[in-house]
Image (cartoon, rainbow, N blue to C red):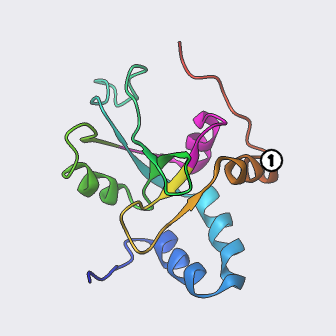
């Protein structure tokens, strides 16, 4: 079994939240103000912006819902991209920005493939958005 070495304060808080229910709220609050990584199927534009035609990695989760793959450290996204034939381009962005773009039918898969992560169902993501006042913005046309 591989070990998980936290790469930043967010991952230290995630470890604590997985061991102690009282730490979960602190983790969520920190997550809301943190930068996360996602994987895309197309490279970033020359100015570093997300190509509107690029699709983020979405996984079908064991609970039967699609979930956006989100990594608690941008370098974890890049490492996961090495193992994907489709999603090989990493992008770091603020978690709140990611939430604004997450469509209602999507859940979140935090650190998919790692023992240090978890899934959020679409209804849990919607509740998180409500709790923190995050409005969903329409996907670019």
The residue drawn where x is 43% and y is 71% is: 8
Compared to 29, does 137 lie above or below? above
Residue 10 drawn at (x, y percent): 51, 69
Residue 96 in the magenta stretch? The answer is yes
Residue 23 in the magenta stretch? The answer is no
Residue 86 quadrant: top left
Residue 30 drawn at (x, y percent): 62, 66
Label 1 crowd bin: few (<14), some (14–19), many (20+), radius 10 Å: few
The residue drawn where x is 72% and y is 49% is: 123
Please indicate whether residue 89 sits to the left or right of residue 92 in the image.
Answer: left
Compared to 82, does 48 lie above or below? above
Position of the N terminus by quadrant = bottom left
The residue drawn where x is 66% and y is 81% is: 23
Outermost residue toward the top in this view: 141
Can residue 33 be seen by looking at this rendering?
no
Look at the image and give the residue range highlighted in magenta: 91-107
Residue 132 drawn at (x, y percent): 77, 52
**Tag count:** 1
Front position in the image: 96 or 105:
105
What secondary structure is found at the residue carrying circle 1?
helix
Outermost residue toward the bottom in this view: 20
Residue 14 drawn at (x, y percent): 53, 74
Please indicate whether residue 132 sits to the left or right of residue 62 in the image.
Answer: right
The residue drawn where x is 63% and y is 87% is: 20
On the image, numbered disc 1 is attached to which residue?
A: 130
Please indicate whether residue 126 sits to the left or right of residue 138 in the image.
Answer: right
Can residue 53 be seen by looking at this rendering?
yes
């Amino acid at each position: 079994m591989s070990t998980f070495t936290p790469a930043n304060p967010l991952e230290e808080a995630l470890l604590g939240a997985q061991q102690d229910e009282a730490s979960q709220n602190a983790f969520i609050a920190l997550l809301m103000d943190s930068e996360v990584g996602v994987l895309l199927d197309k490279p970033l534009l020359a100015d570093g912006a997300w190509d509107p035609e690029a699709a983020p990695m979405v996984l079908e989760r064991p609970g039967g819902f699609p979930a956006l793959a989100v990594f608690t450290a941008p370098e974890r996204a890049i490492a996961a991209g090495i193992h994907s034939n489709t999603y090989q381009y990493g992008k770091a962005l603020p978690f709140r920005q990611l939430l604004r773009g997450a469509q209602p039918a999507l859940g979140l898969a935090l650190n998919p493939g790692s023992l240090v992560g978890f899934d959020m169902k679409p209804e849990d993501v919607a509740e998180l958005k409500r709790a923190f006042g995050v409005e969903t913005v329409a996907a670019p046309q």
